[in-house]
Amino acid sequence: MAFDEEVFVPQSASDDVSVRQNVTAFSDIYCPGSSQNRVYSHTAVEIGIVLSGEGTHLILEQAIPCTAGDAFIIGPGVSHGYFAQNTGEKLEVHRLLFDPVHWFDGPFADPESDRFCGGVFEDGLNIGCAVLTKKTVKQLLELCGQITEEMESRKREWREAVKAHLSLVLILLGRYVGESVKNISYVRSKDWLFVTRTIEIIEADFADNDLTLGSIAERLFVSKAHLSRLFKRLTGEMFSDYLRKVRYSHACKLLAETELPVSEISQSCGFRDLSSFRRVFSASEGTTPSDYRKARIHSENHKNTNIQKESIMSTIAAISENVQKGKAKIVQELVKTAIEEGADISQILNDGLLDGMSVVGENFKVNKVHVPEVLVAARAMNMGVQILKPYLVQAGVEATGKVCIGTVQGDLHDIGKNLVKMMMEGKGLEVIDLGTDVSPEAFVQTAIDENCQIICCSALLTTTMGVMEEVVKLAEEKGIRDKVKIMVGGAPVNEDFCKSIGADVYTSDAASAADAALALCQNA
């Protein structure tokens, strides 16, 4: 359908710079799928301002509800059409048509520029939608009237005057055009725009105790009854209830986060007087504003404590995890972090460092990890313990037990012995490493001097196994046999040999040795 050429007659046959406008009352009813023959498009820009009635604006096959105060800016080549909502009712639209190239220059006239027509089009879509206030509609219509006067009178510099008025029209519209859309399907229902604008006004002006549904309806160029119905239908709440909730929410925030007097909070949140504020508050919370403030402060302190506890637990869990991975430097940093967070030193040691090494020991038992992984994990744990040592001493944290360990005299092998030592330390035991080629006297005397609960002897050679029996006999001679347990291990050693020499415990692997040593110390 052409754009009412009988109304928009150029001033002359060669006059292609006209600004054409009229007011049209649309009575056709929109029917999906059968209204396409009533749409049209232009090579210029059309501005449509809905003056009265309710209906549908079909844009690029998207049906958009429209009512008085809605404005649409339609760019070149965009098909669209206006339709009434009900039979017998008309949708009255003021339409203005102009070619930007003939009136403007620079970005204003360049369709590729984001300043095309003053920025009323975004993302190159060539569509702009706005919900206008009553005051703005009046301003726009006055500008349109001045454009008509200038076009008809053609007085001196009339083109500059028309250009100036067109610029003002676009500037005013640009202030109300909604957020950019990349697809016309995203253009929101005009009903939603009314409600959204109402909510925006409430959030901005809730402190004004003269704010009412009627005052907002006046600003939005819509009837109070219509806005009330829309608000209830789309939000599920009455306007008065929503406004009261917003005011109440802000009051609660001020009570919790500031020391402002209750009377000042009541006034700053739009309540008419202190007594009405207290009534609303009591009905919602079952308590007074002052008691609410005290409870919130207590709750916030409790919440902060819980957050701190959760942070500490998270750090300690990370310590355990990184011990298992052998990440020594990370373990050191995490131990420092846990100390700074106020974690208990024993908790860092037991639930972080020792827990991680214990997991490694269990995995080693079932061959999930091997000696290299155990070694790097033990190194990571020990580096964490070094950070903790001064704090452990200060806190009076004692080891679970004390063990002296070594490879027996005549044997220089120490790989197995070292592994057992790491596993025992991973259980929280203090281990005195005597090294290799250790004499029976050195084992026994160390146990006496250091008050050890366990002597742990290792041998790899069958020729040195007999030294273990000498250790047992010397312990008996020194009178400590009833106080000190003797553990034996190594490749040629077995349970029968252990019993034959009078030793207490034999284990076949390092992890089992650590478990056995811990049990002996705990039962001592």
Image (cartoon, rainbow, N blue to C red):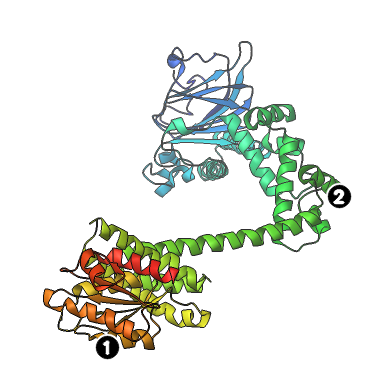
In primary-sequence order, the first of circles 2 and 1 is 2
Instruction: Give the image location of residue 99, x and y in percent.
Output: 43, 36
The answer to whether 440 is drawn above or below residue 66 in the figure is: below
Residue 372 appears left or right of 46: left
User: What is the quadrant of the N terminus in the image?
Assistant: top left
Q: Is residue 196 above or below residue 276?
A: above
Amino acid tagged 1: Glu
Closer to us: mark 2 or mark 1? 1
Residue at image coords 31%, 70%: 504
Which secondary structure lies at badge 2? Answer: loop
* Coordinates of residue 312 in the picture (x, y in percent): 50, 64
Q: State the residue position of label 1.
A: 441
Label 1 secondary element? helix
* Residue 227 visible to an observer of this rendering: yes
From mark 2 to mark 1, how far is it between C-alphas?
92 Å
Residue at 40%, 83% (x, y): give it: 451
Residue 202 position within the rendered picture, expressed as x and y whole percent measured from the top left: 69, 43
Q: Quadrant of the C terminus?
A: bottom left
Name the foreground residue: 506 vs 7.
506
Name the foreground residue: 208 vs 392.
392
Left or right of 24: which side holds 316?
A: left
Which residue is label 2 attached to? 273
Residue that lies at the very extreme toward the right in this rendered image: 275
Q: Nearer the viewer, residue 402 or 194?
A: 402
Q: Is residue 53 above or below residue 288?
A: above
Q: Are there few (<14), some (14-19), or many (20+) residues within 10 Å of tag 1?
A: few
Q: Left or right: where does residue 384 sit relative to residue 368?
A: right
Residue under the point 71% across and 30% down: 228
Pointer 2 local density, CA inside 10 Å: few below 14, some 14–19, many at least 20: few
The percent coordinates of residue 343 (x first, y second) are: 51, 70
**Relative to the observer, which residue lies in front, 106 or 353?**
353
